[in-house]
Image (cartoon, rainbow, N blue to C red):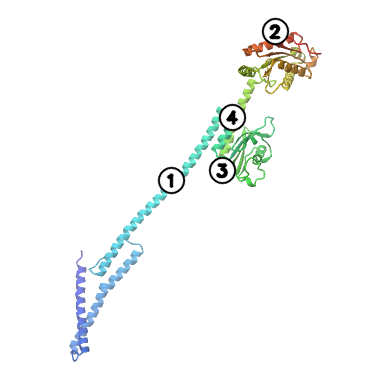
Amino acid sequence: MDPRPARRERLWRIAAVVAGVGSALGASIQLAVTLGFVESLPTPFVLGTILTSALVAAVVAALMVEHLVARRLRALSQFVDEADAGDFLLRIPVKGHGELAETSEALNRLLARITSLRGSMIDQSRELVRTREKLRLEETLAAKTTELEARLAERQLVFDLLRVSVTENELDKVLRELVTRIGTGLHLREAAIFLRAADGSRRYLVRAVHGFQAPQRVLGRLVEAGLGIAGEVARTGQPVVRTDVSDAPEYLAFWGEAVREGSFAAFPISLQGSLLGILGVTRDVSDPLTDAHLRLLGAIADQAALAIRHAQVVDELRALSTTDELTGLANRRALGRQLERELERAQRFHQAVSVIAIDIDHFKNLNDTCGHPTGDAALCAVAEHLQAVVRRIDTVARTGGEEFLVLLPGTTLDEALGVAEKLRVQVADHEIPGGATQPLGRLTISLGVAALLPGEDVAALLARADEALYAAKRHGRDRVERHDGTALSVPAPPSA
């Protein structure tokens, strides 16, 4: 530590003492004269000396005050100004002893505490910034996670629809699966799939629905091209979106079965330019359809088109495998399956079941005379007349070139004979292509009837019906014969 400031401090203190003594001496003399302790002032020399000492003491005192107090106060004030400007790292030099030195030390301690507090505040501020950044990152991560989960759910939905399109073959089941998965996966209020009517017109039938309180009131309803929002899609083949249907007068609200609020969108279900159907969806006003939803629904409609077309193709193939291509009747394969089911049911519940074997009379002559196109037309005409007589639960099948068979569930032998006679008359009484060239002057059929016997199988039942048919052929054709299980029973020939 430099000793010079301490020495100067001592010198200044000695000067202060001298000045104080001089001042005290001058003041004492003046007081003594005033109080009359002395009769007169000292000699001029003594008085001058005293006054000079007093003046010197005053100057010295002033300089002392300037040095010991004023300069330190100015330094202290300047230091405080610098600290107030934000420089808390400064420290006041502590000189000597006394109140100013103690004040300087106290201020230094205060600045040290402020510096420490400021450092703590800086650390806390940095920690706060890091915490805020962490929270921001966590919020961003949560938002990205939510978005990723939504995208994954969407991809899962598309994958599920793809699986449905590959694994499901029945059209109605495919449609139910599609509309349920779409409605649930996208949190739709309602959803419906319209399919183009079978007649090929520009009408679309509601085949599957989701979210309706009374779905039976919507299923089966028809929308025509140009009528309503879905009808606009049917007319243009382009998607239509309404973010708020409350002010859309063209919105039919599913014939009043949906509330007239929220958002609605209708997408074409198209494949290779062919409009198969329409997908209509709604969402609540509090959770409307977004652009992301619309993009996804467009992709879903494309996937639905694949699923629907796949099911339709399977249905067509199934129909081809069980339907006679020329007449549209059931073929032998379909008849065999139906016979097995009906005979099992009849035996289990002790019900009657009958069959009618039918053959067109002199059909070879018709083909040879009129040609095969006329023969095909005659076959189709006979098929239509047979279908016109039987019930919906009965099955009419083409089992050969000009041979047919009718399956009559819940029908006794006598009842079946009545049906057979109606069939014979129905064909004989109508003009059929090529009929005028036939030996009887019209196209006729022969029929053999048999009813199921206890313990009998399909083969035995059909064999007895065939025997009755051959008997009708032998006995002049255009007639009905039956086989009751013991012998052929030949009815009287029909009237001319």
Residue 411 appears in the rendering: yes
Q: Which is closer to the viewer, label 1 or label 2?
A: 2
Q: Is there a contact, CB below 8 Å, between mark 3 and mark 4?
A: no
C-alpha span from label 4 to label 1? 44 Å
Q: Which mark is residue 487?
A: 2
Residue 231, position as x, y percentages in the image: 67, 38
Residue 48 placed where, x, y %? 20, 86
Q: Quadrant of residue 406?
A: top right
Q: Tell me how far mark 1 sits from mark 2, CA to CA.
A: 92 Å
From the viewer's side, name the closer residue of 210 and 370.
210
Q: Residue at label 4? A: 173
Judging by the rendered image, the residue that carries numbered circle 3 is 291
Q: Secondary structure at mark 3?
A: helix
Q: Mark 1 is on which residue type?
A: Glu
The amino acid type found where label 2 is placed reads: Ala
The residues tagged by marks 3 and 4 sit, at their Cα atoms, a distance apart of 30 Å
Q: Is residue 450 above or below residue 126?
A: above
Residue at the extreme bottom of the image, as rendered: 39
Q: Nearer the viewer, residue 112 or 333?
A: 333
Disc 2 from disc 3: Cα separation? 78 Å
